[in-house]
Image (cartoon, coloured by chain):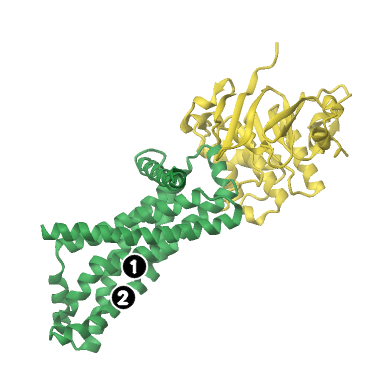
Chain colours: A green, B yellow
């Protein structure tokens, strides 16, 4: 039994060691600004069309589905409120994080995994560079900056899509929709909506890099690392969503 | 007085997941020496080079490079030692996302102990690439080059800082005989022009044979036999590894006289 547990415990330990080193390197030189900028472009600008699309359609679907339920209570005017709260608290951060995990966590794992199996990581160390400083820390910083930004964009696009549906299909006036959406949001919602992507950014970047850096077994290993990274990042996002929601709900009640 | 010690292994044992890769390995490479490391696949040759560079930590034993104990150093201190050691990786290990010029410039720009002035980087890169006869590939990416050209560019990257010790991991693996000869000629050129100590891992006996019996004539720009001539060849020591253990260490004559079937297996390949 103890032997069975050794493996997973070791993996978790290695993950936290990598996370610790990556975070420590944020405050140590050298800083690779060019790599940070390149990653921000890849993660942020590269994911933007996807995030806009996901945000728009999730907002539109929320407006259509919720309006049915709200109509039966005669509260169709509250559609803006429901769309705004759902998007800002849950759907915006979660869907954006899942999209970026699918796109970038797996991308990081495959890129670093390919470098590992072709000895480029060893070469980097041999040529005077710390691979964590050069590869992991820039990805961590870039994800921590870009994911909250992408989430804000997804939230806004989603609420906007809700307005398009409400105005064109449900006959709700613009003023009523935006008023209801704006007044529904409290500090607690916004804080939750912004803390979540920040936490998810750590998961997405560190899980991707972790699986990439421990790749073994040639190109087959790279494929395995990519899949593991995406699955682990997605599952962790769902688990963390639950715990963050719990914390904020308890905090709200108290 | 013997030449200074460049690299010394003292009872080094390395294992991965409790599977031993090197077992109680001891040897000493002195300045100006060439060492040819032979052995079957999985005998620990690559691990030996990576351990010498501090990329792999030994489970026990000590490693000294330039009389400094690598086993007692953290990664940051190892960077300074690594700036004195050039390494050619088996698959070249050029960075895919960088051009050949950026690849060769990488150690000059990133090794803290090198202190290369920015205006000297480009000339030194051009010089290193001219050395391996790849002066016209500066702007190209590794994926645009053939296997042999990539290996030559990787040699340029390994020697651009002028390290006194160069490690070659199977420099001729997977190459056709003509390209393999060109690569070994470059290894000899680097050794004889820059007077470096070198360790070369190989599965081909003829590579070691060239190292032991030929020298690079810089005036003619070609190799010439030197074993029995007036021009001395640096001392070449052959080492044979078997399942992580050093089973032979000595010169070519002793190697060729060995009766052990595992050791003589490598000698029989002589052409």
Q: Foreground residue, A5 or A171? A: A5
Relative to residue A197, is residue B98 drawn left or right? right
Given contact means CB atoms under 8 Å apart, are the residues at marks 2 and 1 in contact? yes
Q: Please name the residue that numbered disc 2 is placed on.
A: A58
Q: Where, quadrant-wise, is the C terminus of chain B in this rendering?
A: top right
Q: Is residue B220 visible?
A: no
Real-space CA distance between mark 2 and mark 1, rounded to the nearest whole angstrom: 9 Å
| Mark 2 nearby-residue class (10 Å; few <14, some 14–19, many ≥20) | many
Q: Chain of mark 2?
A: A
Relative vertical location of residue B182 with respect to residue B117 in this rendering, above or below: below
| Mark 1 nearby-residue class (10 Å; few <14, some 14–19, many ≥20) | some
Q: Where, quadrant-wise, is the N terminus of chain B in this rendering?
A: top right
Relative vertical location of residue A218 with respect to residue A158 in this rendering, above or below: above
Q: Foreground residue, B88 or A5? A: A5
User: For the point 32% across and 64% down, which residue is it?
Assistant: A150
Relative to residue B110, is residue B177 drawn left or right? right
**Residue A122, image x and y in percent?**
56, 42
Q: What is the secondary structure assignment of the residue under circle 1?
A: helix
Q: Please name the residue that numbered disc 1 is placed on.
A: A95
User: For the point 47% across and 44% down, which residue is it?
Assistant: A3
**Residue B196, image x and y in percent?**
68, 28
Relative to residue B213, is residue B35 drawn left or right? left
Marks 2 and 1, the one that precedes in the sequence: 2
Q: Is residue A140 visible?
A: yes
Q: What is the secondary structure assignment of the residue under circle 2?
A: helix
**Residue A224, image x and y in percent?**
53, 58
Relative vertical location of residue B65 with respect to residue A143 in this rendering, above or below: above
User: For the point 72% across and 30% down, which residue is it?
Assistant: B191
Q: Foreground residue, B43 or B214? A: B43
């Amino acid at each position: 039994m103890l032997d069975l547990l050794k493996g997973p415990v070791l993996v978790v330990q290695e993950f936290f060691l990598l996370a610790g080193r990556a975070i420590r390197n944020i405050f140590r030189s050298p800083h690779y600004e060019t790599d940070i900028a390149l990653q921000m472009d890849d993660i942020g600008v590269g994911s933007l069309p996807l995030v806009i699309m996901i945000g728009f359609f999730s907002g539109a679907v929320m407006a259509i589905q919720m309006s049915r339920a709200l109509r039966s209570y005669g509260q169709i005017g509250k559609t803006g409120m429901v769309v705004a709260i759902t998007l800002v608290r849950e759907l915006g951060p979660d869907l954006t994080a899942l999209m970026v995990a699918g796109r970038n966590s797996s991308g990081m794992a495959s890129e670093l995994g390919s470098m590992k199996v072709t000895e480029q990581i060893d070469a980097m160390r041999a040529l005077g560079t710390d691979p964590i400083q050069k590869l992991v820390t820039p990805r961590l910083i870039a994800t921590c900056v870009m994911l909250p930004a992408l989430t804000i964009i997804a939230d806004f696009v989603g609420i906007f899509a809700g307005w398009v549906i409400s105005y064109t299909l449900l006959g709700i006036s613009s003023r009523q929709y935006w008023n209801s959406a704006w007044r529904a949001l409290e500090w607690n919602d916004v804080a939750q909506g912004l803390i979540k992507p920040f936490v998810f950014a750590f998961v997405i970047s560190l899980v991707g890099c972790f699986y990439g850096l421990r790749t073994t077994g040639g190109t087959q290993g790279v494929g395995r690392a990519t899949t593991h990274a995406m699955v682990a990042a997605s599952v962790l996002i769902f688990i963390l969503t639950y715990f963050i929601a719990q914390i904020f709900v308890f905090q709200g009640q108290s | 007085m013997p030449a200074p010690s460049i690299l010394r292994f003292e009872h080094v044992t390395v294992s991965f997941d409790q599977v031993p890769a090197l077992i109680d390995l001891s040897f000493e490479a002195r300045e100006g020496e060439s060492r040819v490391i032979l052995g079957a696949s999985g005998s620990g040759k690559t691990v030996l080079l990576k351990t010498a560079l501090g990329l792999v930590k030994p489970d026990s034993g000590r490693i000294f490079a330039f009389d400094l104990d690598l086993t007692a150093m953290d990664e940051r201190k190892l960077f300074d030692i690594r700036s004195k050691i050039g390494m050619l990786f088996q698959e070249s290990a050029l960075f895919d996302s960088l051009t050949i010029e950026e690849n060769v410039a990488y150690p000059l720009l990133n090794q803290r102990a090198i202190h290369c002035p920015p205006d000297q980087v480009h000339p030194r890169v051009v010089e290193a690439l001219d050395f391996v006869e790849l002066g016209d590939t500066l702007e190209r990416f590794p994926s645009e080059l053939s296997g042999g050209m990539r290996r030559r560019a990787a040699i340029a990257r390994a020697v651009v800082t002028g390290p006194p010790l160069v490690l070659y991991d199977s420099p001729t693996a997977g190459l056709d005989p003509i390209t393999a000869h060109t690569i070994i000629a470059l290894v000899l050129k680097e050794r004889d022009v820059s007077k470096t100590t070198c360790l070369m891992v190989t599965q081909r006996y003829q590579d070691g044979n060239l190292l032991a019996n030929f020298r690079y004539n810089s005036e003619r720009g070609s190799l010439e036999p030197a074993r029995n001539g007036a021009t001395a060849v640096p001392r070449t020591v052959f080492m044979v590894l078997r399942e992580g253990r050093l089973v032979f260490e000595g010169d070519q004559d002793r190697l060729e006289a060995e009766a052990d079937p595992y050791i003589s297996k490598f000698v029989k390949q002589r052409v």
